[in-house]
């Protein structure tokens, strides 16, 4: 029972976000006379605070009774890329454990990976 509660709490953050997303999409659909939505495409950064697995889990709950009910969810992951301040190399922060693979510097600027974007609404 305790484990179940922890699991429930994990995706509360995502559920709130998805409920907001659903509102935005519904609003957009109404304003643009979109009556049927086939797929919602989200882009989520690799090191975003939003966890794709939890988004997928709470999506059916969030869309229940809305215009997005029965629509498909597609999540695209944006890699966490950074540029090294010392040598200019662009590298994936996660794969390289936060060190530049070329010069081992830990001084870099994040270029991408924290996004949360409603990329596309695919209408019928
Ligand atoms: Zn470097």
Image: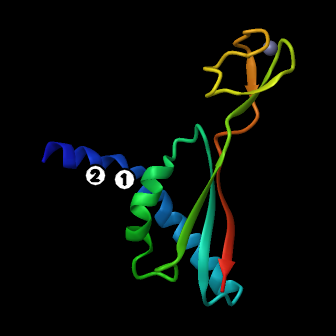
Q: Secondary structure at mark 1?
A: helix
Q: Which mark is residue 12?
A: 1
Between 36 and 23, the one lying in front of the other is: 36
In the displayed structure, 60 sits above or below 52; it is: below
Q: Nearer the viewer, mark 1 or mark 2?
A: 2
| Residue at 46% over, 59% down | 56
Between 26 and 45, the one lying in front of the other is: 45
Judge left or right: residue 1 versus residue 8: left
| Residue at 47% over, 66% down | 19
Q: Quadrant of the C terminus?
A: bottom right
Judge left or right: residue 106 versus residue 14: right
Q: Quadrant of ligand 1?
A: top right
Q: CA distance from mark 1 to mark 2?
A: 7 Å
Judge left or right: residue 78 versus residue 7: right
Mark 1 Cα within 10 Å, few/some/many (few <14, many 20+)? Answer: some
Judge left or right: residue 118 versus residue 14: right
In the displayed structure, 124 sits above or below 46; it is: below
Q: Which mark is residue 8?
A: 2
Q: CB of mark 1 within 8 Å of CB of mark 2?
A: yes
Q: Secondary structure at mark 2?
A: helix
Q: Please state the horizontal and vertical placement of residue 34, each as a whole percent of the image.
A: 66, 87
């Amino acid at each position: 029972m305790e484990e179940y509660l922890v699991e429930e709490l994990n995706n509360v953050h995502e559920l709130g976000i998805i409920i907001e997303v659903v509102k935005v999409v519904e609003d957009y659909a109404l304003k643009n006379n979109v009556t049927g939505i086939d797929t919602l495409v989200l882009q989520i950064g690799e090191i975003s605070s939003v966890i794709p697995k939890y988004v997928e889990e709470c999506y059916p709950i969030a869309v229940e009774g809305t215009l997005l009910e029965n629509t498909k969810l597609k999540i695209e992951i944006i890699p966490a890329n950074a540029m090294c301040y010392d040598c200019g190399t662009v590298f994936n922060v996660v794969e390289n454990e936060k060190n530049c693979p070329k010069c081992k510097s830990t001084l870099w600027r994040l270029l991408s990976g924290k996004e949360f974007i409603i990329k596309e609404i695919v209408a019928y």
